[in-house]
Amino acid sequence: MKTSINFKAVKSDSEIHNFRKKTFDYIRKDLTSQNEYWLEQKIVDRIQKIENYCKEKSGRKLQKNALPIREAVVVIKENTTLQDLHNLSKRLEKELGIRVFQIAIHRDEGHYDKDSKEWKPNLHAHLVADWQDLQTGKTLKHHPRDYSKMQDITAECLEMERGISGSRARLEAIEFKIQKKEEELKALEEKIEEMKNELSSTKSEDLIVMESDFLGFQHIKTDKTIENYKKKIKIYNAQILKNKAELEAKTKQITELQNKTDSLKKEINTLKNKNSLLLSNPNIFAGERKKYLDSVLDTLEKSIMHERFRNPNKDRADSKILIEEMSNICEKTAKENNIPFSALDEILKDSGIVKALLFLLKGGSQGTNNDISQEENLQKSKKRRLR
């Protein structure tokens, strides 16, 4: 069984969801008692603590765009315990400085298999972590290889295989959504059918109004009975129209999701074929590798130029500040463009490229010999990757 971990900015309703402070329509309430929770501190209190420490340590307020609290969803096994996750938390703190202060194990989420109707649990845990660097008071800055190391640590601590990402994961998520939409569609169809059957069932007798004459015989009171039928039919027609509209909307959503799934399947097959070709032909592999790394470098250059023009008056004389800004740009560029950190690692191994990119970020007089030298560094590095 595979696992994975991916930290993102914590959501405002994280504690409500994680600690089941309200009910959700996508969980099995009969399984909620099997969930496990651990809380060292509330998020709002931890944020206050982080802000105070940052002010004390650096003399400055925490930056508005900082992400001092982050949350990860971790795939777990059926027998994964809180202790296993505590061990994972200790490793993350020891090796990467990430301090987990909330853990929630969810065993009440999942779906029913469409064919077998068997319950398929979505076993996972939420880790909420403090992302503050205790040395500087600012947020932690990780090297691209640290994110890969994070996956290795998680798989090792939970005794599971390293997870996969990308198209396959997205495909599985979309197929799950399709199944949920199909279930909703079936429920709507059954509801409409039930309403139609109700109109023709014995319940219609309840609409008939009887009255007794002076001899005690029961007769149908025609005007009131007709009025009752009119009201009932009007209500049913309105409900049927409403459900028909919902039915059409669900059908459209399912069609769109199925089209997206087909597209992803084609994408996966194309990638598989390309991988086979790359593995079997070293020349093609070298050419594709160079082409891809060059495109990553071009993207990084554009991001640096954008940041420089966006903040032209920023003081970049201090090398530490310059390197920190470069690290932020690399991390942001990788996330926004789905660039694996291993690709950035490969590019940044070249000291010439690193110097040229730092010079580009720092800025210089265009057309000077220094500019030309840095540009030559980039071009030479690209040529070396072709060999």
Image: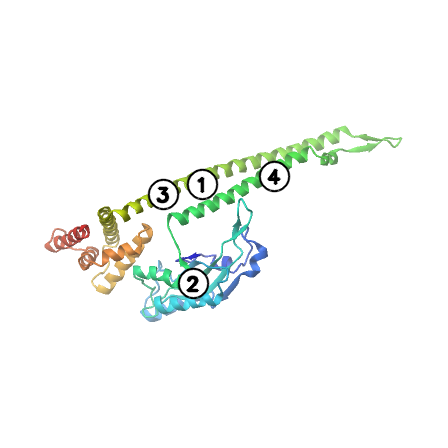
Residue contact between numbered discs 4 and 1, judged by CB atoms under 8 Å = no
Front tag of 3 and 4: 3
Residue contact between numbered discs 3 and 4, judged by CB atoms under 8 Å = no
Report the amino acid beneath label 1.
Answer: Leu
Which element is circle 3 on? helix
Front tag of 4 and 2: 2
Nearer the observer, 268 or 41: 268
Quarter residue 206 falls in? top right
Q: Which mark is residue 191?
A: 4
Q: Relative to residue 247, is residue 261 drawn left or right? A: left
Label 2, residues with CA under 10 Å away: few <14, some 14-19, many ≥20: some
Closer to the N terminus: mark 3 or mark 4?
4
Report the amino acid beneath label 3.
Answer: Asn
- In percent of width and height, residue 240 lies at 60, 35
Closer to the N terminus: mark 2 or mark 1?
2
Quarter residue 92 falls in? bottom left
Q: Which mark is residue 257?
A: 1
Q: Residue at x 39, y 68 (%)?
A: 91
Residue denoted by label 2 = 159
- In percent of width and height, residue 302 lies at 24, 50
Residue denoted by label 3 = 269
Q: CA distance from mark 4 to mark 2?
A: 46 Å
Compared with residue 282, is residue 6 higher up or lower down, i.e. above or below?
below
Report the amino acid beneath label 4.
Answer: Lys
